[in-house]
Amino acid sequence: MMNFRRGTRREDPEINLIPFIDVLLVVLIFLMVTTTYSKFTELQITLPTADAEKALDKPFEINVTVDAKGNYTVNNEPVSFRSPADLAEDLKRAARAANNGQEPGSDKGPVVIVNADQFAMHQMVINVLEAARIAGFDKLTFAAQTGTKK
């Protein structure tokens, strides 16, 4: 048997680094381009300040409280709930009492403030909304307490 490769030394295989560096540069450019868009996603907002006087003619309010057991109060007076129409009559009665017996005007309607317990059923709050709609009171807001940090 003849060995033709007797004089030639076997070379170790090498990794060609030039294509590897080319790929890494392309990936690096891609990452640099995509990370520049992240600074546009955050919004730097400076809120305006208002130095207006407080409104002198504060609209009168009707406070409706709903507890977790289903009890309703209108301006801290317990009312028995039978239907949204009956609750609407209670709201109108409270509006007349707050307006010194006069029928409230449509432009100066009361603000109905709903103070609902966090465990009150959703239907109870919907009953108050329906009663306010039947009574014709279109200004309505919900009261909430500020969360305390633990």
Image (spheres, helix red, strand yellow):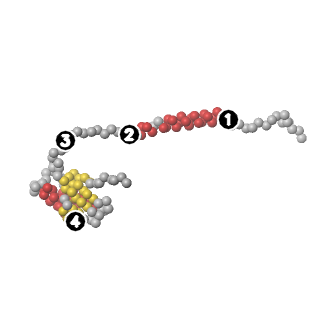
Residue 83, above or below 147:
below
What residue do we see at 19% from left, 53% from top? 61
Dot 4 or dot 3: first in sequence order is 3
**Residue 21 placement (x, y as % from top left):** 61, 34
| On-image quarter of the C terminus | bottom left
State the SS at label 4: loop
State the SS at label 1: loop
Residue indicated by mark 2: 43
**Residue 2 placement (x, y as % from top left):** 88, 38
Dot 3 or dot 2: first in sequence order is 2
Q: Are marks 3 and 2 in contact (CB under 8 Å)?
A: no
Residue 81, above or below 37:
below
What residue do we see at 75% from left, 38% from top? 12
Residue indicated by mark 3: 53
Packing grade of label 3 (10 A; few <14, some 14-19, many >=20) is few
Question: Closest to the observer: 77 or 18?
Answer: 77
- Compute the Cα span from label 1 to label 2: 46 Å
> Left or right of 68: which side holds 54?
left
**Residue 36 placement (x, y as % from top left):** 47, 36
Residue indicated by mark 4: 81
Packing grade of label 1 (10 A; few <14, some 14-19, many >=20) is few
What residue do we see at 26% from left, 54% from top? 143
